Amino acid sequence: LILSTAKGNPKLKDLFVRPNIIAKRVSGSLEAHANVGDAFLGWDS
């Protein structure tokens, strides 16, 4: 994962993974990067 030195990578926030593996909704964010395309970042519990 190579982070850009620019102001910021494009990011989509408050996304939910589907299908749900567990009963509760889990959110995170999707961020674009130079070498891997897209990466799902973290979980907000």
Image: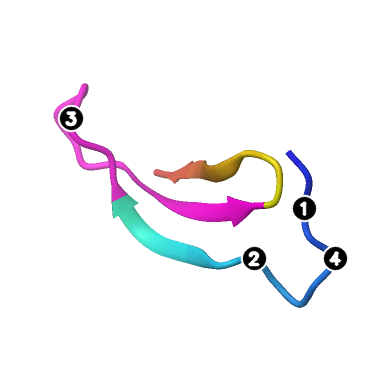
- Packing grade of label 4 (10 A; few <14, some 14-19, many >=20) is few
Instruction: Point out the frontmost of discs 1 and 3.
Output: 1
Q: Is residue 27 above or below residue 1?
A: below
- Image coordinates for residue 11, horizontal then vertical, percent: 51, 64
Query: Which amino acid does the dot numbered 2 rest on?
Result: Asn
Q: Looking at the image, do the residues carrying marks 1 and 4 touch, with CB atoms under 8 Å apart?
A: yes
Query: Reading the chain from its start, which is encountered first: label 4 or label 3?
Result: 4
Query: Reading the chain from its start, which is encountered first: label 2 or label 1?
Result: 1
> Picture quarter containing residue 6?
bottom right
Query: Which amino acid does the dot numbered 1 rest on?
Result: Leu
Q: How far is the residue under mark 2 from the one under mark 4?
A: 9 Å
Query: Reading the chain from its start, which is encountered first: label 2 or label 3?
Result: 2
Name the residue: 41% across, 63% down. 13
Q: Is residue 13 above or below residue 19?
A: below
Q: Which mark is residue 38?
A: none
Residue corresponding to mark 3: 20
Element class at badge 4: loop
Q: Which mark is residue 3?
A: 1
Q: How far is the residue under mark 1 from the one under mark 3?
A: 29 Å
Residue 3: within the magenta?
Answer: no
- Furthest-bottom residue in view? 7
Q: How far is the residue under mark 2 from the one under mark 1?
A: 8 Å
Choose between 29 and 7: the one closer to the eye: 7
Query: Which amino acid does the dot numbered 3 rest on?
Result: Asn
Element class at badge 2: loop
Instruction: Point out the frontmost of discs 4 and 3.
Output: 4
Residue corresponding to mark 4: 5
Q: How far is the residue under mark 4 from the one under mark 3?
A: 34 Å
**Residue numbers of the magenta segment:** 16-33
Residue 27: within the magenta?
Answer: yes
Residue corresponding to mark 2: 9
